[in-house]
Image (tube, grey):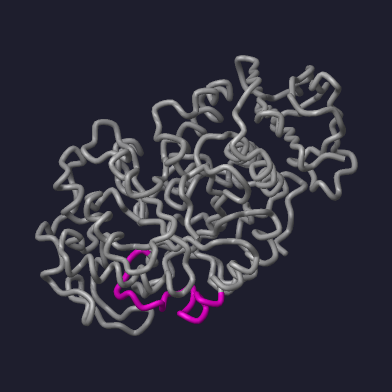
Amino acid sequence: MQQRSRVLGGTLAGVLAAAGLAAFVPWPSQATPGGERAAAAPAGEKTVTATLFERPFAEVAKVCTDQLGPAGYGYVEVSPASEHIQGDQWWTSYQPVSYKIAGRLGDRDAFAAMTKACHAAGVEVIADAVINHMSAGSGTGTGGSQYTKYDYPGVYQDQDFHGCRKDISDYDNRDDVQNCELVGLADLDTGSDAVRGTIAGYLDDLRQLGADGFRIDAAKHMAADDIAAIKGRMSQDPGYWVSEVIAGDGEAVKPEEYTGIGDVDEFRYGTHLKSAFQAGTLAQLKSVADGKLPGDKARTFVDNWDTERNGSTLTYKDGDRYTLAHVFLLASPYGSPNVYSGYTWDDKDAGPPSGADGWTGVHAATAVTGMVGFRNTVGSAELANWWDNGGDAISFSRGESGFVALNDGDGDVSRTFTTALPAGTYCNVVKAAPDDCAGNTVTVGDDGTAQLTVPARSAVALHIGAKE
């Protein structure tokens, strides 16, 4: 659940998000569906997350086995598991009514089977945890629980919620942001020892079912000390931890407050990408880390389910530019990349597809899986040999392990690029898989240069793990 913030133009997120624009046309080579981290961007292999938004747990298990594991993803983030209000809209998942594993995505057995399958494929599971609030009304939950806004039998009663029973109205006021109600949702008193214990018990349960860590929804609306106390109350090792905190100019609550707990989703990264691709030039991506969280604490992304609906980032509807943005996301050394893979929509409130059709499949696009392999290969190698034409063409190397060139212009870019790679023939992993690269190879000379033509709205990416 995204927070309302001045940085997003003051618009309500989640249930009040605005709609997007044109349809996504993936590059022709798109594929068809088939523990704990100490830092956000560690050296070594398998550091990329795929968020499979609103995918049933049984389907996530299959995706881990057939796609994420073979592609080299290290993590999969899944949507909330807890029982929630009834309804077809996507945001019903973000209004919990109990901590039973009984949402529309599957039950306890399905969750446990998913984590087992993902682990067997070498993929760890990050669970989206909604712990700031409960629902906005009354009724019967997806698991049969009866509830009213401030009474959840066996879980919470009126005294477990903050006394401010009105919507947040002033983001310059910390008390308002963290003690009042986000779009009418009953705000839990996370300063209460009893509430902290109940939440910690829920997170422990998910860990026992195989979750390897958590994405903390609406973290901005809880004091960092409260979240740290909840984490400290867990009897299980908390595992990987990332907080959702949107930066807003001049606002009282800042993302930097949460880096002592774990990683933080860096929303400014996605808005920077949109600015570069739609309003500015790719040359401005040279400063993509400026004014943001330290790279070892930032989780980066092109978009997510909130931002694709409120217009603050690029979306799957931006076609080739969206693909190029993912190439940059996975090529740049800044932050820990998270590839968002959702579903197509015209109605901003629409829930997930009921069958195999309608999913964007971003996580399985050849350009994206090729860049996951790139990221795993280059590890922590430094960015070097930056070049740009002052406009929409850029290139850079990652040490002597990888090289990428991007062209968001309207015409081809032909020149001699400094790749810093050892001499040899390489596969352009943006266009083809290394084991089937005919027609998509690049030759690097003894001096580490390559004569390349990068077509409009396209990219070339080479790495030493995809060399003939």
Q: What stretch is highlighted in magenta?
A: 94-113
Q: Quadrant of the N terminus?
A: bottom left
Q: Which residue ends up furthest to the right in the rendered image?
A: 438
State the image coordinates of residue 328 (x, y, percent, origin top left). Answer: 61, 35
Question: In the depicted view, which residue is nearer to us: 385 or 189?
Answer: 385
Figure disc tally: 0
Question: In the depicted view, which residue is nearer to us: 463 or 393?
Answer: 463
State the image coordinates of residue 178 (x, y, percent, origin top left). Answer: 20, 51
State the image coordinates of residue 44 (x, y, percent, origin top left). Answer: 61, 45
Q: Residue at x 74, y 24 (%)?
A: 420
Left or right position of 72 against 293: right
Observer able to see residue 356: no
Q: Residue at x 26, y 67 (%)?
A: 134
Q: Is residue 189 magenta?
A: no
Observer able to see residue 233: yes
Left or right position of 85 against 383: left
Question: In the depicted view, which residue is nearer to us: 98 or 203?
Answer: 203
Q: Quadrant of the C terminus?
A: top right
Q: Give the answer, above or below, for where 423 lies relative to 130.
A: above
When asked about the image quadrant of residue 329, the answer is top right
Left or right position of 266 against 56: left
State the image coordinates of residue 148 (x, y, percent, origin top left). Answer: 20, 75
Q: Give the answer, above or below, for where 294 lies relative to 64.
A: above
When asked about the image quadrant of residue 422, the answer is top right
Q: Which residue is drawn at 84% across and 26% down?
A: 444
Q: Which residue ends up furthest to the top in the rendered image?
A: 390
Q: Does the magenta stretch include residue 103?
A: yes
Q: Which residue ends up furthest to the bottom in the rendered image?
A: 144
